[in-house]
Every structure is written in structure tokens, then in C-alpha cells.
Image (cartoon, grey):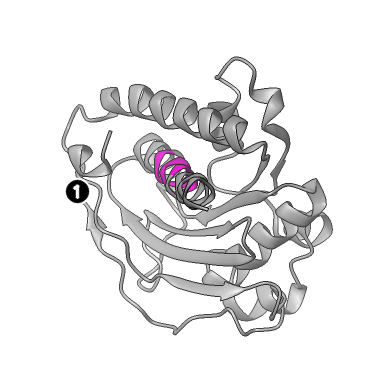
């Protein structure tokens, strides 16, 4: 089901790089700073829509990954394992999912995903360079074909003028070597922000995996 049905905004702050040419800590993947992200307005009661949408996205992801014979990994901070949980709701998900990382603390991001402490110090955990490194690190550590990383401020505390509550950075390390990053600003309470984050992470994985499948079919 399209994201627009629940009011999710269009893509923003989108950047791509090729891991074959630049590693996640090289700085080549980092996009411009200070970019504004659109605000997602969530209507009261919208939370009831998220579980069916998440279930649908997870099922679609499973079908296409099974068709491709590929596996996905996750690197999560603000969602606390929610993306991995959604993926494994689908029966048979062990065929396309083996490993997920919940790296809530900066030290865990560095230890398990290879995020450079200097990157965390310079940009903060909720930043483009960090999610790019998280995604690349998860893909490599899990020996997966693709990976998604999220780091954000789910609230109700922890926001700032520069990074208000609801700010979430996403990174996707893809099977063709690209890394795609994106920033969103979601509204709603903590549960709503986390649910929207899980859904958007899955939807982009589905989109990229379906593109890969379509490209294979056209060859």
C-alpha cells in the first residue's frame, strides 16, 4: 500500500554513493549538512493503520527476497529491533533474514558496526554519515545482500532546535554497492515515530529489491 495513504511525505535529503569506490568512513558518501526535512503530520488514531501496513511491507519484502535468493540485515537504534521484528513476523523469514543489530549506544555502533568514534563525535548518532556507516557495517558483518540502518529521536525528550523530536536518518546498503540515505521528520508520539520509521525502512527495502528483480527479468 502506498505510503501516501497514511500521509508520509515524499523522499528528502536523498544521496547515493558506491561502496566499491568509497567506503562508509571515507566521507565521500556524506551529503550536504543543514538540509531541511519535511514534517509528517499524523492524524489522531492513525496508529491503528501501521501494523497492517508494516505486515504488508514485510510480506512483500520476503516474497521478493526469496525470489532473488538474497538476504537482508538490519542496524537499528531508535526502533530497538522493530524492523527485524517486523521482518520475522513472516513465516519462513529465516530464508532471507539471519542477523540484525540493535546498537542503541554509540559504543555499540562503533563496536559491532564499525562506525568510527570520530564520526559519531563530529556528527552525532542521528546523522547521515553515521547511518551510512551503520548500513554498510551491518551488510558486511552479516554477509547480507542488503541492509537498512536507522538512527533517530523518537521522543518525548532528546530533541533540539537542529534535530527536533521525530527526526530520523535512514541508510540502505544495497546489493549493487550503492548506499542511499534519507532524512525524515515524523510527528506523533514515541510509538508513532517508531512505527513510521519501521514502515518507511521496509518500504524502501521493498522498492529497491523489486527494482533488482525487474532488472534481472529484463536481461
Identify the residue at image location x=38%, y=73%.
Answer: 162
Please tell me which residue lies in front, 156 or 64: 64
**SS class, disc 1:** loop
Q: Residue furthest front?
A: 219
Quadrant placement of the N terminus: top left
* 100 relative to 162, above or below: above
Q: x, y (%) of residue 145?
A: 68, 49
Quarter of the image holding residue 83?
Answer: top right
Residue at 53% x, 70% y is: 128
Q: Magenta includes 201? A: yes
Question: Where residue 9 sits: x, y (%)?
Answer: 24, 54
* Foreground of the two, 150 or 192: 150
State which quadrant residue 165 falls in.
bottom left
Q: Is residue 143 magenta?
A: no
Task: Give 93 or 13, whichever is nearer the viewer.
Answer: 93
Residue 166 image offset from top left, x and y in percent = 37, 53
Residue at 58%, 67% in the rendered image: 178
Q: Which residue is mark 1?
A: 41
- Within 10 Å of disc 1 (Cα), the crowding (few <14, some 14-19, many 20+) is some
Q: Position of residue 18 (x, y in %)?
A: 62, 74
Instruction: Tally the marks.
Output: 1
The stretch in magenta equals: 199-206
Q: Main secondary structure of the magenta part?
A: helix
User: Which residue reaches farthest top?
Assistant: 91
Amino acid at each position: 500500500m502506498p505510503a501516501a495513504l497514511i500521509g508520509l511525505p515524499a523522499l528528502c535529503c536523498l544521496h547515493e554513493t558506491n561502496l566499491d569506490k568509497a567506503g562508509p568512513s571515507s566521507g565521500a558518501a556524506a551529503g550536504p549538512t543543514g538540509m531541511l526535512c519535511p514534517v509528517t503530520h499524523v492524524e489522531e488514531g492513525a496508529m491503528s493503520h501501521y501494523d497492517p501496513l508494516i505486515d504488508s511491507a514485510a510480506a512483500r519484502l520476503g516474497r521478493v527476497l526469496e525470489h532473488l535468493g538474497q538476504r537482508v540485515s538490519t542496524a537499528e537504534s531508535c526502533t530497538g529491533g522493530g524492523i527485524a521484528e517486523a521482518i520475522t513476523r513472516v513465516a519462513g523469514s529465516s530464508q532471507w533474514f539471519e542477523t540484525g543489530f540493535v546498537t542503541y549506544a554509540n559504543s555499540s555502533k562503533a563496536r559491532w558496526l564499525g562506525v568510527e568514534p570520530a564520526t559519531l563525535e563530529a556528527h552525532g548518532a542521528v546523522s547521515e554519515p553515521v547511518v551510512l556507516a551503520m548500513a554498510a557495517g551491518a551488510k558486511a558483518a552479516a554477509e547480507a545482500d542488503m541492509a537498512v540502518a536507522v538512527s533517530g529521536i523518537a521522543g518525548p525528550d532528546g530533541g533540539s532546535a537542529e534535530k527536533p523530536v521525530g527526526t530520523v536518518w535512514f541508510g540502505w546498503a544495497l546489493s549493487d554497492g550503492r548506499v542511499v540515505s534519507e532524512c525524515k521528520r515524523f510527528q506523533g508520539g514515541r510509538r508513532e515515530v517508531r512505527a513510521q520509521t519501521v514502515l518507511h525502512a521496509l518500504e524502501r527495502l521493498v522498492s529497491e529489491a523489486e527494482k533488482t528483480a525487474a532488472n534481472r527479468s529484463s536481461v
